[in-house]
Image (cartoon, grey):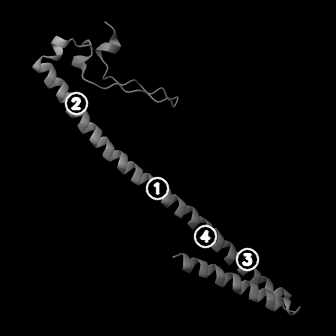
Amino acid sequence: MNENIESPDVEPEDSGKGIPIKRLKGRRAFTNVRRELSDEELSSPAVQRMLIDDIERLEKENFDLLEYQEKFHEADKKAAILEEKLKASVTQEIAFGVCLTLGAASLAYAPSVWTNQPTGWIAIAFGAFLIIGGIASKVVKR
């Protein structure tokens, strides 16, 4: 007999190529049973019970999967919101770093141009403005 028909529950090995593998699941006892049922067979109470049992099992699985689907969508929304917050946070951190760096550089430059007034005062004012603005942006973000 064909090996695939006798062992459908065996999962194939991953080929490592990134191709999704279809996993076969089901009851092994019913793999060789023909799928078409006659009217006589459908009128049997045993067959009816089996079919009702399968319908109830599938409805329960469907209900469970709907819950997972809702949870997935909630988690997906939350992840998207957190990613946007992270992007904004990274942008704010870059602006904070740039303001502090340029402000410190301007304050460090002020003594070298102190003899050329008002350039010295402008360098100090510009540096202080950038440092205070950078700190304020960090405080406001929180």
Residue at (85% x, 87% y) in the render: 113
Q: Determine whether, in the image, residue 124 is placed left or right of residue 60.
A: right
Neighbour tally class for label 4: few under 14, some 14-19, many 20 plus, Cα within 10 Å: some
Q: Residue furthest left?
A: 45
Residue at (34% x, 9% y) in the render: 2
Report the amino acid beneath label 4.
Answer: Gln
Q: If you read the primary sequence from the N terminus, does the residue marked by circle 1 or circle 4 appear first?
A: 1
Report the amino acid beneath label 3.
Answer: Leu
> Dot 2: what SS?
helix
- To which residue does mark 4 refer? 92
Residue 59 on image: x %, y %? 25, 36
Q: If you read the primary sequence from the N terminus, does the residue marked by circle 4 or circle 3 appear first?
A: 4
Judged by depth in the image, the label closer to the viewer, 2 or 4, is 2
- To which residue does mark 1 refer? 79
Residue 122 on image: x %, y %? 80, 88
> Dot 1: what SS?
helix
Q: Which mark is residue 102?
A: 3
Judged by depth in the image, the label closer to the viewer, 1 or 4, is 1
Quadrant assignment, res 21: top left
Residue 69 on image: x %, y %? 36, 45
Residue at (57% x, 62% y) in the render: 87
- To which residue does mark 2 refer? 55
Distance, label 4 to label 3, CA atoms, is 15 Å
